[in-house]
Image (cartoon, coloured by chain):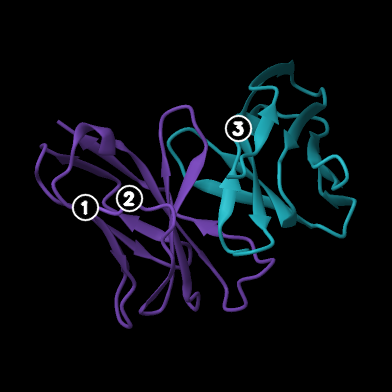
Amino acid sequence: NAGVMQNPRHLVRRRGQEARLRCSPVKGHSHVYWYRQLPEEGLKFMVYLQKENIIDESGMPKERFSAEFPKEGPSILRIQQVVRGDSAAYFCASSAETGNNQPQHFGDGTRLSIL
Amino acid sequence: SQQGEEDPQALSIQEGENATMNCSYKTSINNLQWYRQNSGRGLVHLILIRSNEREKHSGRLRVTLDTSKKSSSLLITASRAADTASYFCATAVLQGAQKLVFGQGTRLTINP
C-alpha cells in the first residue's frame, strides 16, 4: 500500500494524558499536512510541514499542540494534557515535491476519543 | 478567513439520476479541488481545477468553476449506489497555496 498511513486508527485517552498521532506520507512525498474534523463538519487545516521544517502552523492551537516531521520516520502530531474538546478525527495528507496545484493524498485518519 | 460552503447540505436521489453539488468561496484562489469521503474513511481526491480553467471532466464527473461568482459545481452523471458519500470542495488560496480550506460538505445518498 503506497498511500498515506496513519496510526493508530483509534486512540482513547483520559483527560490530562498525552496523545501521539503518527503519519507516514506517500513514498517520495516531502509535504505533510494535518487536519482536524469534527462530526458532520469539514476538515480544518492545522499545520503544514516539509522535512524537518514547520512551514505554516496557523491552524494549530498555540498551547498543548505540536507537530514534527523528522528527517527519518513519520510525522507526529502531539497533543499534551488532552481535554474533551480534543475529541475529533485527525487526518494527515501528503503531496508531491512541487506542492503547488498538486492534489493532497489523505490517510484514513486517527479518531481520538477523550474520556 | 475564507470558508467554502457547499449546497445542498444533503442530497438524496435515485440510482441512475444525476447529482449536482455546488460550492461557493470568498477569496481569490489558486485552484479548487473536490474530494469524496466515505463514512469512517479519509478523503479521496476526485478532481482539481485551476483558477484559469472553466470546466473539467473525469469519467462520470464534471466540474465547473466560475471565478467571477466564486463558485464551483460538481456533477455526477448516472449515479450509482457506490457514489453514496460526503463530497467536499476545498480551495487552495493564492498565498499559502498548500493550505486547503474545506467546506462543510454535501452528504449524497443514492437510493437503489
Which residue is under mark 3? Answer: B105
Please, is residue B33 above or below residue B94 in the view?
above
Percent x, y of residue B108: 65, 25
Between the residue at mark 3 and the residue at mark 1, the CA separation in whole angstroms equals 29 Å
Marks 1 and 2 in Cβ contact (< 8 Å): yes
Q: Quadrant of the C terminus of chain A?
A: top left
Q: Crowding at label 2, few (<14), some or many (≥20) Cα neighbours within 10 Å? A: few
Percent x, y of residue A55: 45, 71
Q: Crowding at label 1, few (<14), some or many (≥20) Cα neighbours within 10 Å? A: few
Q: Which chain is purple?
A: A
Which residue is under mark 2? Answer: A61
Q: Colour of chain B?
A: cyan
Q: What residue is shown at x 65% (from left), y 66% (from top)?
A: A102
Callout in the foreground (3, 2): 2
Q: What residue is shown at x 43% (from left), y 52% (from top)?
A: A59
Residue A10 in sight from this viewpoint:
yes
Which residue is under mark 1? Answer: A64
Q: Crowding at label 3, few (<14), some or many (≥20) Cα neighbours within 10 Å? A: many
